[in-house]
Image: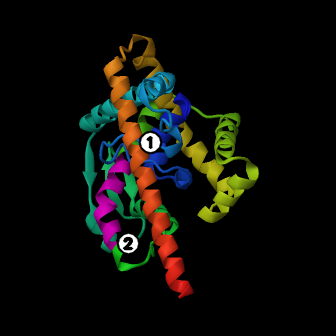
Amino acid sequence: MFNKKNLVFIAACLVVGFAIGFLFGYTDIFGNGEPVEEDPADLIGEPDGENGFEEAKPQLEQQLIQQKEQEVIMEHMDELREEATVETNLDVIGEGDESAVVAEVNGEEITKEELLAMEEQEKQQMAMMGMDPDGAEAEQMMEEMRPEILENLVLLSLLEQQAEKEGVTVEEEDVEEYYQQFVEQAGGEEAFNQQLEQSGITEDELKKDIADQLPTELYLEKYIDENFDEDELDITEEELRELYETQQQQMQQQQQMDMEELEEMEEMEVEEEN
């Protein structure tokens, strides 16, 4: 389970698609308002009945706290977006060079090059899921996703502007601290380096991305500290039980899907042998 720093960092950086997004399977909380997708490892596991619910309560409470923190972030993003002056122009995608402006956010430009870089990362995700990133299906998906990707860049620009306005700065040790968090979450240096290699980026490139995005994370962390007090939350038994039952259902559905996939693989092996 991620702590508050990681939740905010994901909200500020990973979900908008910068280079280390390949490490985590989270939905886009900026683009469509959907909550962060639960990692299967965070789902409440096997215990059933009242005993299982009681044992799961502390973890359920922590998950609800994180969800409510996330809601605070999303509300803040909505406020920033409503107050911003934003102009977009996706027509330049099919024409002009990479310096062409696809959006202006309070006077700050977002270029075609930046948008294409985000699209390239989405294509890498597609490739990791077994899709042909240059195929017709992927191209169609990219066209459909392009407005959402641009909106993510708009929101990231707004956060960067807020961080600059608040005078947020980043030191080298801050970058190293967060880099080491990702190493630990990946299971150590060797596993992390393998993931970096698969993604096609270097350690230096990753650290540069962290340095570029970390002011945004620190700004949001500061905002959460000032605008969210978990001690004032009134988490009810009903909320906890609803989350528990939802996760139990998700776990059962996932087990069913796993069984079906296993049966399909076994059938394929039998057919190949014959």
Q: Residue at x 53, y 85 (%)?
A: 272
Q: Residues within 10 Å of mark 1 (few under 14, many from 20)?
A: some
Q: Residues within 10 Å of mark 2 (few under 14, many from 20)?
A: some
Q: Which residues are magenta?
A: 138-154
Instruction: Label the magenta part by its dominant secondary structure.
Output: helix
Q: Which residue is at the front of the view, 110 or 139? A: 139
The image quadrant where one finds the N terminus is: top right
Q: Residue at x 55, y 31 (%)?
A: 5
Task: State the CA–CA distance, disc 1 to disc 2.
Answer: 25 Å
Height in image: 183 above or below 56? below
Q: Kindly check if marks 1 and 2 are in contact, taking CB atoms under 8 A apart as contact.
A: no
Q: Which residue is at the front of the view, 274 or 264? A: 274
Residue 69: x and y, percent? 41, 27
In this rendering, would 222 be left or right of 84? Answer: right
Q: Residue at x 28, y 38 (%)?
A: 81
Height in image: 166 above or below 106? above
- Element under disc 2: helix
Label for residue 213? none
In this rendering, would 123 be left or right of 82? Answer: right
Give the residue number, with chain letter if any, for mark 1. Answer: 38
Could you tell me how many numbered marks the image carries? 2
Residue 147: x and y, percent? 29, 58
Q: Earlier in the sequence, mark 1 or mark 2?
A: 1
Label for residue 138? 2
Q: Say whether residue 135 is visible.
A: yes
In the image, farthest residue toward the bottom: 274
Q: Amino acid at mark 1?
A: Glu
In this rendering, would 160 be left or right of 84? Answer: right
